[in-house]
Amino acid sequence: HAADAASGKVDAESEAAEQDPSKVYPYSLDKVPSVIDFTTWTAPGGDRFDEYKKGGMPWMITDEILQQSDECARSRREHVKNAMKFAWDGYTKYAFGNDEVLPQSKGTSNNWGGMGTTLVDSLDTLWLMGLKDEFWKARDWVRDHLDNGHVGSVSVFETTIRSLGGLLSAYDWSGDSAFLDKAHDLGKRLFKAFDNPTGLPYGQVSLSSGATNNIGWTGGNGIVAEMGTLQIEFRYLAKAVEVPEYATTSEKVFTILDKMPHHHGLYPYYIRNRSNPPSFANKKLTFGAMADSLYEYMLKIWLQGGRKEPLYREMYDRAIQGMHDELLQTSTPTGLTYIADKNGESLDHKMDHLVCFMGGLLALGAYTDPEGGLQSPRAQRDLRTAKALTYTCYQMYARMNTGISPEYVQFKEGSDFHIGRGAPHYLLRPEAVESFYILNYLTGDPVYREWGWEVFCAIERYCKTSIAYGSLRSVENTDGQPDNKMESFFLAETLKYLYLLQDPDSEVDILEKHVFNTEAHPMRIFPVIDEDDQKKKRKSSFFR
């Protein structure tokens, strides 16, 4: 049984046992050595841990199991930190201050206009991993060299979540005003995108001239996720620099969306944001690309404000009900849970890797349900879906030759899923490990650390170059070389979530203190900021 336990091959428990587990968590929780040769790692294969596929709690997690899990995690944590140090050193040596380092050629790329995107996106990862020397050196560059005034047209969404979010999170953790100064300068420039009579922002803005437009390939339309994924950042900025307009103007997006005709709380992803009133330009419903983070921010804006603004939570709950009624599917023969796309009346049985954030989001929504709490039928349904969906996402990794997930999978009756057409690549994406982190944090189940460790081992084995990490062209090719591309979100999100997953000692508190933006930048929620400010005032008056 021990050998089976180590490999993840344990008989699935019955439905009753899922609800009332009587057997203790059986898998190995041994600490890993401090030196590991990842080049010899091979993917252990799929169809393991299948007692998790229905989303129950199949094993009893005792205090002893939790303690062993934490000890094991601390030994793994060091390897993830080493990976960050390795990638950061490569970036520092070959591309410091540039947007990206090219991990094969050792060159630089300024594809974001020369805003030091990798540096800014990595700041809070460095802080949370305790890499403070690297953090302060990066702070000096931000203070002395970051200049948004020379940058032309940028994506409002990408620049807000990566750069504005990165600066605000670095400020929130360190308290260093250099980050807030640069964030305010950037925020002012990005805010011009909201200069539209309809109240909906444009997709692009020139940081130097303020000229606005929508992205060319959208047919002149705005994208719903991009409009609805700016508020965490602009609300925080509004509070920090005392410019309420940043908050009120960005929040109007949700007021407008709430009044538009929707489909069971779900929104097509193209919006005619130049016409007044705005209208939808397509019918496709998805929790993948171009809609995904809209639903994420419905919940997270509500959490950021201290759970006091009901509109956002109501929109979230309505959307999640719509997802269950309209899009949630189960594969054959294995019975994997997935969220399909819908175009008009027809379902497209595909799922983007991007959708894998939904496991974590559903769990966070369940644990904060305002109607009856976690034990309410709705919260229990959402938590079960969260776990089942996250198991499917784990299988998207485990069933591939490299142990790494493709960009999307297509589900087919009788054979579960296969790699989506034209999508065998892996861009170093974080969404699955994001859900592993949130589910482990909330439930304590060590299995999510196990799955995350497998993903980390696969990345070390197949994505590492001589100076950093690169994306993969095909997750089926175990002889392939990493591409000459490392997105900033690999350091901002993927490595951060892999680290936090194995870090039982972190100060991050996703239930009571912090909210992550969609680029994994954690910031304090408003009630905590207010409380901290009061403490500072009392302290300063005491010493006066």
Image: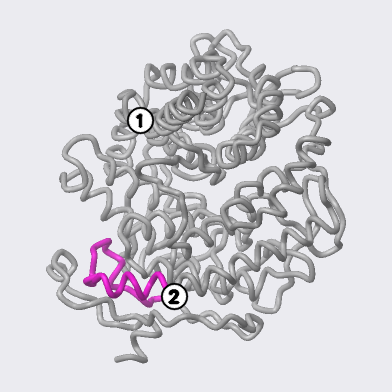
- Quarter of the rendering containing residue 336: bottom left
260 horizontally vs 201: left or right: left
71 in magenta = yes
The front one of 332 and 223 is 223
Among the two numbered marks 2 and 1 on one chain, the one whose residue lies closer to the N terminus: 2
Q: Which residue is mark 1?
A: 306
Task: For mark 2, give the secondary structure.
Answer: helix
SS at circle 1: loop
Residue 226, above or below 1 = above
Which residue sits at x=69%, y=63%?
85
Q: Amino acid at mark 2?
A: Cys
Amino acid type, callout 1: Gly
Q: Which residue is mark 2?
A: 72
Query: From what the image shows, is residue 357 above or below residue 31?
Result: above
Quarter occupied by residue 211: top right
Q: Is 521 drawn above or below residue 420 in the view shown?
A: above
Instruction: State the residue in front, 543 or 133.
Output: 543
Q: Is residue 137 visible?
A: yes
Magenta segment: 46-72
